Image (cartoon, rainbow, N blue to C red):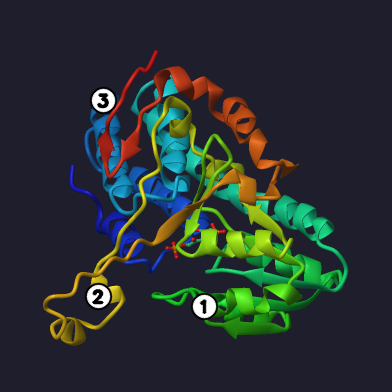
Amino acid sequence: MEVPSEVLKIADDIKSMKIRGAGNIARAAAEALKTAAELYRGPADRRVFTEYIEKISSLILSTRPTAVSLPNAVLYVTSALENVGGGFEEARSTVIEVASKFIKETLEAYVKISEFGAKRLKDNSVVLTHCHSTAVVNVIVKAFKLNKVSKVYSTETRPVFQGRITVRELSKHGVPVVQIPDSAVRYVMHEVDHALVGADAVACNGALINKIGTSQIALSAKEARVNFYVVAETYKFSPETIIGELIPIEHRPPEELYPLEVLNEFKKTKFLNPVFDVTPPEYIDALITEIGVIPPQLASYVLFEKYGWALNKIKIRRMGKILVEDVD
Ligand code: RUB
């Protein structure tokens, strides 16, 4: 059974970062599985349909390696498929329903997160953020409406400039925002009350994996005794880290640093473009999630609560490969 062009387009858009940010990536993954099930034209045979969904899952998982929300979205849908009884029709409707439920729940999480996050900020706060996180934008906009934010510093976020999206979105809501180069973070930190960043993944020890440069901001915030908060929905917590897996850090091509014609002039120079980094839990004051504001030390508790059912049967799905199955 061929992969529908609509699904191939979603995979391409994630790979090329047209769809980006961990939340959007996860919803796009669920949307791809839902669309694939809706467009399935193969035999009405559960086994054939399941193989087809596995193929789609592998394709989606191969797009970007770091945002744990992606394998978690796929796990959410495929485990429901594994658990449902019945034949082909039940299997197909389960994929469609569960994928839609995932999308709905992740959007609902923003409501809780922005409520909890806004409560946490003090009145008239100066906030600093990095990259573009939909979850962070939601918190800031909510807090701004409650008169709790007076100014936001937003980093440009080189090399892809996601900070420009943040500036555009915050400005649309009337939030006073100042764009700064990434290297100006420490220069403005003395003015900042709270640093707020999103998450691509949260490990079981509470470490954060987020846009490259996040750990430098955390370091600078700690030095200046500024609160460093991570806004992270719980579907960004990584169950694989409980069984000792490390979260892979994506490296992207040097063309993101220089245009190809310029790169050709640097024949002997090597380029490194890691796009995420790790912030240790000691630098994080709290994780703002849809289930509450928790210390990073509680991450493993959340993981056992949320993914405990999957741990004896966890499939490590990275870059489209199932590396481990049925772990005892
Ligand atoms: C985006 C990034 C964001 C998180 C959280 O990186 O690091 O901070 O994904 O975003 P990229 P959200 O642009 O490389 O995808 O809150 O939107 O899930």
Distance (Cα) linking label 1 and label 3: 54 Å
| Up/down of 154 relative to 235, above or below | below
User: Residue 61: percent from the left, percent from the top?
Assistant: 32, 45
Ligand 1: does it lie within 8 Å of the C-beta at label 2?
no
For the residue marked with disc 1, what is the amino acid?
Answer: Ser
Q: Which residue is pictured at 22% across the width and 38% down the height?
A: 42
- Is 53 situated left or right of 95 in this image? left
Q: Is mark 3 within 8 Å of ligand 1?
A: no
Q: Quadrant of residue 123?
A: bottom right
Tag 1 secondary structure: helix
Q: Which residue is mark 1?
A: 183
Q: Nearer the viewer, mark 1 or mark 3?
A: 1
Pointer 2 or 1: first along the chain: 1
Residue displayed at 37% across by 51% down: 32
Measured in 3D between alpha carbons, the distance from the residue under mark 2 to the one under mark 1, in whole angstroms, is 21 Å
Residue 211 against residue 55 in the figure, above or below: below
Q: SS class of the residue under badge 2?
A: helix
Q: Nearer the viewer, mark 2 or mark 1?
A: 1
The disc at residue 255 is 2
Q: Looking at the picture, tell me which residue is in the foreground, 21 or 224.
A: 224
Residue 169 in view here: no
Q: Are marks 2 and 1 in contact (CB under 8 Å)?
A: no
Q: Quarter-wise, where is residue 47 in the image?
A: top left
Q: As shown in the figure, which amino acid type bears the numbered disc 3? A: Arg
Point out residue 87 in the picture as x, y percentages from the top left corner: 36, 22
Which residue lies under the disc numbered 3? 47
Mark positioned earlier in the residue sequence (1 or 3): 3
Q: Is 196 or 55 nearer to us in this picture?
A: 196
Disc nearer the start of the sequence (3/2): 3
